Image (cartoon, grey):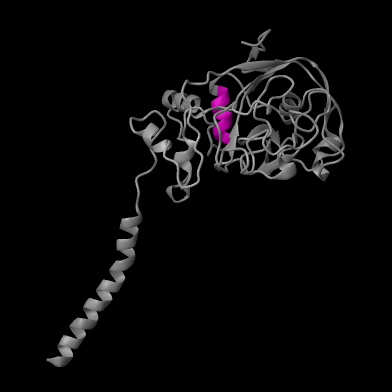
Amino acid sequence: MLETKFKVAILLAVLFMTSLPVMGILRGTKPPPPEVGSPDAQETDNQPGAGTTVAVSQAPIEPQIVRIPAGSFLRGTNAGGYDEKPEGTVHLDTYLIDRYEVTNRHYQEFRAATGHRKAAPPSRYAKNIARLRDPNQPVVYVSWEDADAYCRWRGKRLPTEAQWEKAMRGTDGRLWPWGNALERTASNWGNEDGYRFTAPVGTFERDVSPFGVVDGAGNVMEWVEDWYGEDAYRHASKRNPMGPDHGVYKVMRGGGYMSRGNDVRITSRSRMVPGFRDETIGFRCAITGKILGGETPAQAS
């Protein structure tokens, strides 16, 4: 009898111990953050954590497009990394580019119209997503394929590397949108600018290029059209250059809110596999000479 009671006690103890992980999983499970535009999204998205500045915007920011005139500009810098060299003059034909990074609000319109997957990470990586969901914040957690699909839905395309750099740099060879000196609070990078995460697009008045395109040195890194080539500048055409015909990585340009130091320099080049999604990566669109069988509009709308 004593031996039987002992066995029962051991069995109960084992059952209790094995149930602990299950109880922990159930207790730690939380519903996913609400979609932009859902009834409870505004209340959830604007709940800051301790010491956290959360972007909160009011009126929707409407998309605008900027005309970049034909002409030459200085691409790259000999003061940068190997893949930023050699600096040289490149000619681009006229094109149009979005003034702002694509926002959550406008990406949600795309999803509603097409049924495309939402811009979100797996739930185990969703720690900060509620603080990145304001309608006027740039959409994040989008892959290169997601960005390409959105731009084509809009009748546009992703800008090439050269188009992105000229739009952000202008024609005088400056290294940041505001000039040639790095400034900690001129754009949304690091933790000294008042925003721990992304800001509504166009928030930083000094992060504006000579052409009026915003957020090139902060907020989010941006997918562009080109495949990455470390020595691409050494072999590219001097007129309307494109990246390599194929590759492993797609190029990302611009600084993000988690970037550091020279990574926010306009000439800096980043790369990632096209299927990658992260809270630091977004995009904007452009229109070149011919897109989907049509011609470039004569002027910006």
Residue 120 visible, this orientation: no
Magenta span: 145-152
100 falls in the magenta region: no
Residue 135 coordinates in the image, percent (x, y): 47, 28
Which quarter of the picture shows residue 228?
top right
Look at the image and tell me in which quarter the N terminus lies: bottom left
Q: Is residue 17 above or below residue 46?
A: below
Give whichever of 48, 219 is nearer the camera.
Answer: 48
Write the residue at 43% across / 23% down.
113
Residue 63 visible, this orientation: yes
Please give left or right for residue 7 compared with residue 283 in the image: left
Please give left or right for residue 62 compared with residue 223 in the image: left
Magenta region, main secondary structure: helix
Give whichever of 148, 11 is nearer the camera.
Answer: 11
Please give left or right for residue 297 compared with residue 26 in the image: right
Give whichever of 174, 68 is nearer the camera.
Answer: 174
Which quarter of the picture shows residue 142?
top right
Q: Is residue 184 above or below residue 125?
A: above
Outermost residue on the left side: it is 1
Residue 253 coordinates in the image, percent (x, y): 69, 35
Please give left or right for residue 1 compared with residue 78 in the image: left
148 falls in the magenta region: yes
Residue 276 coordinates in the image, percent (x, y): 57, 43
Look at the image and tell me in which quarter the C terminus lies: top right
